[in-house]
Amino acid sequence: MKKIFFSRPFFPSHKENKMKNEGDLECSRGTFLKKKFNNLHFLLRKRFEWMNDYIQGGMKVVEIGSGSGFLKFYINEPVILTDAVKNPWIDKVIDATNMKFKNNSIDVIIASHTIHHFYNPATFFKECSRVLKKNGVILISETYTSLIMRIILNLMKHEGYNYDINVFDYDSICNQKNDPWSANCAIPELLFDDEKKFNNFFSNLKIEKQKFDEFLIFPLSGGVVSKIKMIEIPTLLLKLVDILDNFIIWLAPSIF
């Protein structure tokens, strides 16, 4: 994978992070419930509501790495929220690389902005193959280290990236194993850019569809867990920004 600018491994320490409340899930959830910040609400709708097209009544749906538990506000059917850390809104504490579910028992697995935190994503997908029913699906929303995203990461020092790893290796360590907030934002690209390679390595899985659809909408949200100050924007204006996002992403996805 060739990157011209900001291509070297970049892993800032947690104390370098210029955003507030890193890892404070209770704070992010409480703030959102107290005053549903419209910018963040708009972002979360974009990230979650499309998933309803793949979920039907009676399906067993599990979210991995639920964090602040926002998913349940946007999905029409019941979802089992899981995380490596116990919080009141979490239904089950599990390790995503060693799920405590029976073989062929789950219809839908949701992973929203969590795969880039896994120390070994290959093991996660191996587990998905085991626990998913026949014709089960994995619904993923993830980051992409475009040029602008790499610049933002270098400025805010919230998360990092490293392209010099092998995500198709069950022994590869892609993040710090004992740090749930360790983040390598290059992981999704390394996994999904070459669909043929992914499909061949995980023989029981197949990438069906991919789409780029966020640019300005993300920084305008002020952050999901870690926060920066941001003015609240009316929904109509956010919709116009979203249209602009779709155009410039189509124009140059490697930049935006």
Image: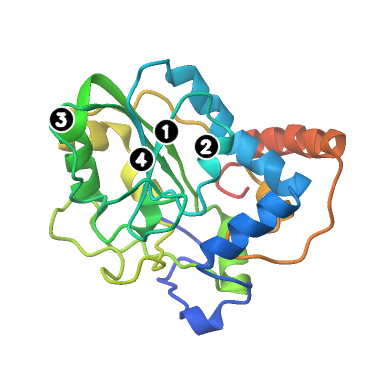
The residue under label 2 is which amino acid type?
A: Lys
Residue lying at the far bottom of the rendered structure: 15
Q: Residue at x 67, y 50 (%)?
A: 33
- Under circle 2, the secondary element is helix
Outermost residue on the front side: it is 88
Q: Of discs 3 and 1, which sits in the foreground? A: 1
Tell me the distance, in whole angstroms, between the alpha carbons under discs 3 and 1. Answer: 27 Å
Q: CA distance from mark 3 to mark 2?
A: 31 Å
Mark seen at residue 72: 2
Which of the 4 image quadrants contains residue 95? Answer: bottom left
* Way the structure is coloured: rainbow
The label shown at residue 160 is none
Q: Is residue 239 left or right of residue 139?
A: right
Q: Which amino acid, mark 4?
A: Phe
Residue occupied by mark 1:
79
The span from disc 2 to disc 4 (Cα, nearest Å) is 26 Å
- How far apart marks 1 and 4 lie (CA) works out to 25 Å
Mark 3 or mark 1: which comes first in sequence? 1
Check disc 4 and report the residue beneath it. Answer: 192
Q: Is residue 119 above or below residue 108?
A: below
Q: Residue at x 13, y 60 (%)?
A: 171
Seen in the picture, residue 5 relative to 170 is either above or below; the reply is: below
Q: Which element type, helix, strand or loop, lies under badge 3?
A: loop
Residue at 55% over, 45% down: 70
Whole-angstrom CA distance, mark 1 to mark 2, is 7 Å
